[in-house]
Amino acid sequence: MRNGNVMAETEVSRREFVRLAMMSSAVLMSGVLTLEGQQLTPHAQLRELAPGTIRPEGWLRGMLEKQAAHLGSKLPQVSSPFTGAYWAGDEAYTPRKPGQEWWPWEQKGYWIDGATRLALVLDDEQLLEQATQALQYTLSHADADGYLGPQKFKEPKADYHRWPQSIVFRGFTACADATSPSAGMTSASIVEALRKHYLNDAASYGSPERNVINIETILWCYGRTGDKRLLTLAENAWTEFLPKAGDPEFGDISAERVYADTPIKSHGVTYAETVKLPAILYLYTGKEEYLKFAEAAERRIFDHHMLISGIPSTSEHYRTTTSLDLHETCDIADHTWSWGYQLMATGDAVWADRIERACFNAAPGAIRKDWKGLQYFSGPNQFLATLNSDHHPEGHGGAMMAYQPNPGKKTACCGGNVHRIFPNYAIRMWMQTGDDGLAAVLYGASKVKTAVGKEREPIEIEQMTNYPFEEQIHFKIGASRAVTFPLYLRIPGWCRAPKLTVNGKPMVAQRTAKGFLVVRRAFKPGDTLTLTLPMETAVSHWPQGGVGLEHGPLVYSLPIQTNWSQVVEENYSTAEYPSWEARPVSAWNYGLALDGTQETKGVDFTAKSQPAGDNADPWENPPTALQVSARKIDGWKLRSNPQHPEQKFTSALPDLSTNKAGSTTERLTLVPYGSTELRVTIFPTLKA
């Protein structure tokens, strides 16, 4: 980046920040994003509220605070490339191989966006200042023609020269939309800088493949400026992109392929990032062909690749759904982000169900409970997780399954991208509806302050619950007077008999075809609605005779007692934030003895009161469990490397024709998937 006018280096008072933010062309009205009184996404069924409008509480706040205290704020001091000044002047990087100059800027960009959103939902000024330093630098060092970013990427060339921008620019959009301005930046300055960058850029946004992801920010900028040249740029980029799709790594989403009922042959992150774009195009244009394309592309994921944890089998590329299949942690962030756009475009609660399942199972199941390490690859069955136990097909024996502050070392993306998962869940818990109402789309203890009804009257709703560890969710209305508006409450697809009371009295509410209960009334200050979502135990079936157990939105696993050992890897971990290896010290080789005619018979759900104080984290001390009968299977052991017998791997489900189960039946206690690190989730089935 060139040296230019350094706005970020000028001290401006916080009062001046607020004054400048009020001058922005993007007007924030009580948490609802508008442009001169009009919604920014005119064809959305549901619309996002501004970052900072929703304040998480309960276990979600506890998790976010733990994230902020550890890797959320410490990663830039712990591991390369996050320790580098990428996006803040550092351009001294020798690529690993030709065409990958973009790599460190991509990784740092993930952290910048995630940490910025984390700071916004927690109202953490110190973290916000840390996370946005690179954004301030980038904004204040724009070229005269508006280009934002490293000089080495400015001239178009045959690599992903605009892919890093698409990642870090999301941090800009969060700051511009937030309820509180960020130091050194205003909404107006961000919007204008991005508009100038895109309209003057000589790069193609239709190719190479990942450049097209910039459509997301181009349309965000269009929505806040009304500059139709940006809409034209976005639509032309999509049109240019489609005929070029078909690259063996990043393609498989051309028009003739996306409607096929076949497994996906594509890179998971790239596919998830790309197929959200037609849904976003629909939000701004209303063209049905865009939405049809997006839904067809998503359907292939759910038809062919979903794992029990709620994320598709994506050990880099989409794969099968056996007990050994894995998902990249980046895919949790990117698929749930993509599904959020589907939720807004369609208004269908099924997309919120999918976000919820991934965030309650796959996400905490890939992260150490102290937020000091995470896995690059994580899966339903992982009997050990060491620096040489990775069993995915392309990286056999690697370190991708160990718990590290920056897993994968030079691959590194998950170490930054993990920070987007739960802040984005919090930001999207509540959404505005087209009839001036409010929708609770993702559940959890929280407070939302916004405006509702035809007169845009201010309101606060406090959501009190320990969901998903309990069935009841209470909504307490806070307002200065009675307010009339529709309140939408999501009914998860797994819930057959929801119940609703208002101030303790049963109420019958309208049930929509898209999975919501709608309460239309004049809400008085202090009114309390209680939604009860009865949870049932279910058995799901998987390849090779495998079964899994679920209760409500949670998947249950056998936790394997773990022996942890620490390794400090130069440049990638420290004594305080080491790489962690996990080895099993308890038996795991069990098959479930389920009733052949009624599979859930004999599977007992138990719940206990949530501990208080330091033990209140339900992911560390789960308050719910399933009790199930099981028998050990002789001969089901860790698999060894024939060339190096000391090297072990998680093994596939056993062949019960040669591996016999013992005669002694035991009662196992299964806990939520997200509260485990080593686990068995997909079990072989035995006759009861």
Image (cartoon, helix red, strand yellow):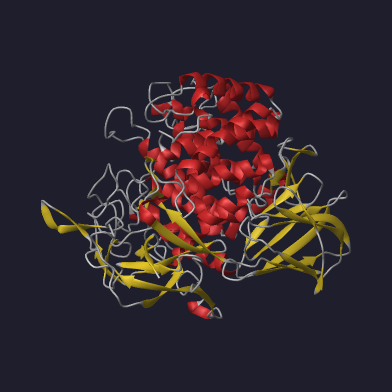
Front position in the image: 149 or 683: 683
Rendered position, 67 above or below 642: below
Front position in the image: 170 or 615: 615
Quadrant location of the N terminus in the rendered image: top left
Rendered position, 675 above or below 338: below
Task: Give the percent coordinates (x, y) of residue 571.
Answer: 27, 51
Report the number of numbered marks.
0
Q: Is there any visible trace of residue 192 in the rendered image?
A: no
Task: Give the percent coordinates (x, y) of residue 309.
Answer: 46, 55
- Horizontal relation, residue 129 to residue 21: left or right: left
Q: Residue at x 69, y 35 (%)?
A: 224
- Horizontal relation, residue 376 to residue 495: left or right: left
Task: Give the percent coordinates (x, y) of residue 313.
Answer: 41, 46
Residue sitting at the far front: 597
- Horizontal relation, residue 363 to residue 522: left or right: left
Front position in the image: 572 or 537: 537
Q: Residue at x 53, y 50 (%)?
A: 116
User: Quarter of the image holding residue 645?
Assistant: bottom left
User: Quarter of the image holding residue 583?
Assistant: bottom left
Q: Residue at x 37, y 41 (%)?
A: 316
Task: Give the percent coordinates (x, y) of residue 279.
Answer: 61, 35
Front position in the image: 412 or 611: 611
Quadrant location of the C terminus in the rendered image: bottom left
Residue sitting at the far left: 643
Q: Is there any visible trace of residue 410 in the rendered image?
A: yes
